[in-house]
Image (cartoon, helix red, strand yellow):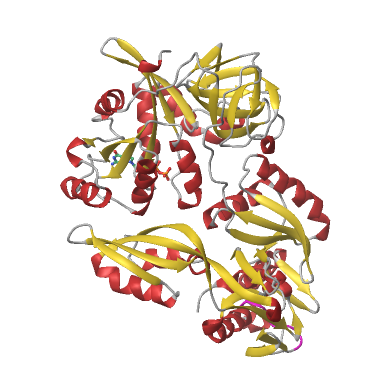
Amino acid sequence: MEREFIRNFSIIAHIDHGKSTLADQLLLQSGAITQRDFKDQMLDDLDIERDRGITVKAHAVALRYEYEGQTYELNLIDTPGHVDFHYEVSRSLAACEGALLLVDAFQGVQAQTVANAYAAIEVDLEIIPVVNKIDLPVTRVEEVLDEVETVLGLDATQALRVSAKTGVGVETVFKAIIERIPHPSGHSTSPLQALIFDSKYDSFRGVIIYIRLVEGQIAKGDKIRFMRTGGVQEVIEVGQFIPKLTSCESLGAGQVGYIITGVKKLEDVKVGDTVTHEHRKAEKALPGYREPKQMVFCGMYPIEATDFEKLRDELGKMSLNDASFSFQPETSDALGFGFRCGFLGMLHMEIIQQRLEHESNIDLIQTAPNVTYELLLRGGQVMMLDNPQDVPDAGSIEEFREPIAKVNFIVPTSNIGVLMQMCEERRGNYINTEYLGPDRAQVIYELPLAEIIYDMHDRLKSATRGYGTMDYEVTGYKTANLVKMDVLVKSVQVDALATIVHRDVAEKRGRGLVKRLKDEISKHQFEIPLQAAIGGKIIARETISALRKNVTAKCYGGDITRKRKLWAKQKEGKKRLKQFGQVEIPQKAFLSVLEAG
Ligand code: GTP
């Protein structure tokens, strides 16, 4: 395919604004899939993924579209919508010349619309604003267009109006892609430079490497070199997703597709690396990506010590398909042998955790998540810390630094007050407010990441009755007056309950924590004192009194169904209990550590 007839684009949007629906509609209207296939595929998405078809949700689909008597190749490159995956958005965008910016006709510009639009502007893409869901009974199309202009500085007169659901206006999308997005600029005769923008492990074929050819050509049998990692491989297969994995003879400059080589492990392929020919090397590698940074860590421990190896296998499987997830063994006095796992953010953590629970049969105790800290030690060394248990002696710390994020909130103007209060309580630093219209505003704050990760999103949703949205980006580290807070259960320190807190709020947090622990830990045959301490000094204390009677004795008149329920509940709860000394501590107690207040 000649480059004049190729267009590479992404769809970017806030969550739920209709990205997948529009992508499906583009597939349908270009004839890439039929209505019937489409339904079938929707039914068993997961099986399809396993079955290596990877169609509707493919990361890069090549569509053929006839326009004014000419066939065009339109490569749709997928981007994830969530804040945890910012770096993946930027890397997908780097493989495109343009982007469709989808905005819901009622909800308007939201926090991730802004973040994604800026990411596209940064890499100089042609942005086509598309107002979606115009079929809704109530829309605010004109206001939404105003927001696109004021907040994003894009020309709203050029915006398209569509319904991805009904298909109305979708042909204008094809037209705009062809007429407004520039064709790629490389030459097929130049030395090969192909950008690796994604990779996936497939149990049948091994590692599938997604590439965007910037210069040159690549064909089956070519000997290639990964310019940054230095590996040399032979190309076993070249192809495109049309939308199923379809092999072809070669790919030329500007095209998007995949290669399969002898690479066996996902770790051996670096996303952002450049592929060139071993015998005709490009002079330099394409600009790569920033390494994804893991910002959130937690411990995962099998309840049964015998499950340790099984857990290691399961975590290994997870990391096969997700190079941004990491894990390494650690030990805790309280929990025994387990793993310290690193994630890009909270959503990423939840996804991995859910998959672990679904795909393996291991009962886990997960410790409260924490962010990565930076410590400047007295000797001048800088130490990164991802586990509160590893905080060195206070005397050896010169500076304790925590990650700071710039947070962009979009909220109804009537909620600005409560939002500000929420941010102030979390050590926020106000930056500014910009009104998007009479009813909505964008409020920017700088907040410690630790204050955001746990429940900020939920609190925002409940404070704004679901209307507020937020997006954040970690901007750097700042010195803060932080200390390690220990927890003692029956006078014994439980390392897995230790946290890092700000000195000013330590007492309050300590009191809140022991109180919550008191609620979470059931009564035993003896009294259990719970204490929070900083550097050996007790700052808060609660006591769980000793159990006097059998729990079921509380039930009136021998109501057997009630008793059964209670027993069943206790049994269920047992699965997630960890015996610590004489005291049983349930899973929930470990997570209660981070709740604010
Ligand atoms: P994420 O993948 O979660 O980021 O969402 P998305 O942006 O891909 O949104 P998706 O396509 O899943 O659509 C979200 C919801 O909006 C679904 O319930 C769709 O049916 C609905 N939707 C999408 N497009 C339209 C439209 O044009 N009109 C109407 N009425 N609903 C739509």
**Residue located 74% across and 54% down the image:** 328
Report which quarter residue 436 is drawn in.
bottom left
Q: In x, y percent, where is residue 259? A: 60, 23
Above or below: residue 56 compared with residue 471? above
Q: Is residue 523 magenta?
A: yes
Magenta residues span 520-526
Secondary structure mainly formed by the magenta segment: loop
Q: Which residue occupies 70% across, 25% down?
A: 232
User: Which residue: 34% across, 63% down?
Assistant: 444
Compared to residue 119, the image places residue 208 above or below, namely: above
Say which quadrant the N terminus sits in.
top left
The image position of residue 44, as x and y in percent, is 53, 33
- Determine which quarter of the picture holds residue 185: top left
Name the foreground residue: 467 vs 518: 467
**Residue 517 x, y percent position in the rendering:** 62, 79
Q: In which quarter of the image is ligand 1?
A: top left
Rendered position, 250 above or below 175:
above
**Drawn side of residue 331 relative to residue 114, left or right:** right
Name the one closer to the observer, 45 or 212.
212
